Each structure stands twice: as structure tokens, then as C-alpha cells.
Amino acid sequence: MKVLVAVKRVIDYNVTIRVKPDHSDVDLTNVKMALNPFCEIAVEEAVRLKEKGIATEVVVATIGPKAAQEQLRTALALGADRAIHVETDERVESLGAAKALARLVEEEQPGLVILGKQAIDTDNNQTGQMLAALTGLPQGTFASEVKVEGEKLQVTREVDGGLQTVELALPAIITTDLRLNEPRYAKLPDIMKAKKKPLDVKTPADLGVEVASRVKLLKVEPPAERQGGVKVSSVDELVDKLKNEAKVL
């Protein structure tokens, strides 16, 4: 079974986000970029399936600028076999990414597609669901456990009420939650080997899709700075401040 994993290049989660002086966008100058944490979990799950003998090949794909090849090489160092880069300098939104991935699914014919449930930059949590709709494949989102049994896939999902287990017929699409696994660290020999693994570069035009943004970004503002707290001497004073100053009561 071939497994296709979609990954995304994002700002490293340890980095403090800065806004450009003109508030036109986030400032990426000299900012460390990384593989989206949920995508790392998706890659790890695919590699584990290969190690169990369930998957025969792990293919990683991304849509983004040329620099995103760095994150593809990271995924290759983690155990993926080959990579596909759909190169574009456009600001790609969920639907554009889903359309490009749908064409890759059509070309690659994977038995399973794994995505992170969301990217930590936009937090949209949309691409996996849109991809399932475009391809007509069954989906299991927010997966905390995955079991492959023959032509069936059991996915334990994290939902508001607790856990829900669904059974899907393969091929299928799943999106990963935090508790699915703990991603491994890439070893130096694997990083060196990743440089020689196949990386195929395509364009959206090659796939017959458009990924240009349909949403206009007007302004970016940093979150308001937290104000210092105050100590109160009694419950009555606390209620008074909540009612008359904070106006939350």
C-alpha cells in the first residue's frame, strides 16, 4: 500500500511572531521555518505503517515556495521514500492546497492519505476535509489511533464527547491529532541519505489547478499585550472591579 502524506512549511513554533511595520503581513525576515508539528505526526504514522510491513512506500508532498524543499528533505530524513513539490509563490489557502492534492491523489493512487489536522500558522483545519470531498474518499479526522486490517481502516477520533471509533474502507483520508504518536528525531545518517532521495518538482499548471488566493489580506495586527493584574482585599472588591472596570458581569 502506498501512503501519501501532505506536509506544510510554517514558522517554527518556538519563534516569536513579528508583524511588519506596515501591518501588511507577518515578517518572515531571518525567521526559522519548520515542518508543521501535525504534519510531523502524519509522517511518523506513515513511516510506522511501513515499518510494520503495511505500507510499501511513503510519499510526501507540499505546495509552496522553493524553500519548502527544506521541509520535504526533513520528511525524507524521517523515513519517507520520495517527495513531490508543487512549487508556487502564491499564498496558498486550504481549497487551493486540496485541489492540488486531489490531482496528486489521482496521479499517485495511494491506498491511504495522511494530513495533519491543521497548520499552526492559519489553524484552519480544512484541507483534509476538502480533499476528502474533492476525491470522494472516506475520511477519519482528528485521529488518535489508526489500525489497518486488510481493506479496512479503524480510526479512533478525538471528539468533544470523548473518543469515537469509525471504520473506513480503503483508500481513505485521515488527519492526525496530537496524541496519535511521538515523532522521531532525524539522525545524521538519515539526513545525509535524504539528500539523495527523489524529489519531483511540479507546478500548479502541471496539475491543471489554480492555487491563487481568493481572500484579500487587509491588515495584520499583533495580539494586545497583557495588562498587569491587581490584588483585591475582599470578594466584594473583586465583584465590583469585574462589574464596573472589566465589565464582564
Image (cartoon, grey):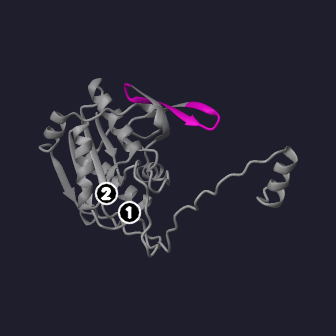
In which image quadrant can residue 81 be found?
Answer: top left
Name which residue type carries label 2.
Ile
Residue 75 lies, with reference to residue 85, above or below; the image says above
Q: Which mark is residue 92?
A: 1
Indicate the quadrant containing the N terminus: top left, top right, bottom left or bottom right: top left
Residue 204 x/y as whole percent: 28, 63
Left/right placement of residue 228 relative to residue 5 reads right
Residue 219 lies, with reference to residue 66, above or below; the image says below
What residue lies at 47% left-to-right and 37% top-to-bottom? 178
N-term mark: 1 or 2: 2
Span highlighted in magenta in the image: 149-164
Residue closest to the far left: 196
Indicate the quadrant containing the C terminus: top left, top right, bottom left or bottom right: bottom right
Tag 1 and tag 2, C-beta contact below 8 Å? yes
The residue wearing badge 2 is 63
Per the picture, the main secondary structure of the magenta-coloured stretch is strand
Name which residue type carries label 1.
Val
